[in-house]
Image (cartoon, helix red, strand yellow):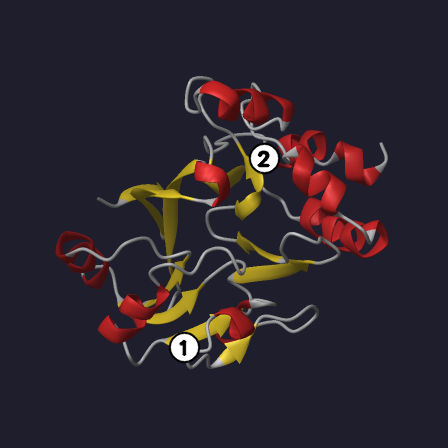
Amino acid sequence: MLKEFGPDIWIADGPVVTAAAGFHYPTRMAVIRLTNGDLVLWSPVELTSDLRFEIEALGTVRHLVPPNALHHTWLAEWHEAFPEAKIYAPPGLREKRSDIAFDEDLRRDTPISAWMGEIDIVIVEGNRITTEAVLFHHRSETAIFADLLQQFPRDWFKGWRGLVARLDLMVAPEPSVPRKFRVAFTDRQVARAALDHILAWPAKKVLMAHGTPITADGQAFLRRAFRWLAGE
């Protein structure tokens, strides 16, 4: 079921998936409508007939965007349903999904021409776990993250997983960068360069795949969430 998140942006929550060591993650996608009516689908969740009907009512699906090499589970079925849509490859995903014929790579300092002036993209490099493409939708003033920001309810994980989640800052009072991602930044200089670009966005809202969205004072929230990296 699509929920409006702002002007020309909607979100849909998908099923819970199981990751490494049995950790369960909720899934979420974003749908952005460009001024020409084309749709950008960020981190597509499981494709259902109801979701497809709602999305097709909004416009024409032209862009399928996995934000990192971890968010790709349902990518092939969306491409099968919308074969005319361009499919983008964040760093590391071409090697992981050789079964998918990607049309274009998401690269640092290489904007997507079809989105120019409507969606900005920053590639956050320098992390051993994953390289993430962070988006900013100008019309809704929304910054969009996949895994770099997370927040779960305190009782989401049970037993030893609950302890790990608390130590990893996954159940903090507001969304934050998990400790495992902080430690995994081996090139902080290049990561800070990406962060400088992100913090320059006039973000009022912040959306993430695994966490409670921020709906006000987004730029101030981002400065708090990444203070450890910015050195403030």
In this rendering, is residue 83 above or below 26? below
How much space separates mark 2 and mark 1, taking CA atoms?
35 Å
Q: Is residue 146 left or right of residue 77?
A: right
Quadrant containing the C terminus in the rendered view: top right
Q: Of 161 and 94, which appears nearest the observer?
A: 161
Residue 228 at what x, y percent from top left? 78, 33
Residue at 82% x, 54% y is 187
Which tag, 2 or 1, sits closer to the chain's start?
1
Residue 13 at what x, y percent from top left? 31, 42
Q: Which residue is mark 1?
A: 100
In this rendering, is residue 130 above or below 169? below
Count all numbered tags in the image, as a single digit.
2
Give neighbour class at mark 2: few <14, some 14-19, many 20+ (Cα, 10 Å). many
Residue at 47% x, 33% y is 211
Q: Are marks 2 and 1 in contact (CB under 8 Å)?
A: no
Residue at 80% x, 49% y is 192
| Mark carried by residue 205 | none
Q: Is residue 181 left or right of residue 93?
A: right
Quarter location, residue 26: top left
Name the residue type under label 2. Answer: Gly
Q: Which residue is mark 2?
A: 218
Q: Is residue 75 left or right of residue 115?
A: left
Name the residue type under label 1. Answer: Ile
Q: Is residue 84 visible?
A: yes
Residue at 61% x, 31% y is 176
Q: Secondary structure at mark 1?
A: loop
Quarter location, residue 223: top right
Residue 167 at what x, y percent from top left? 64, 23
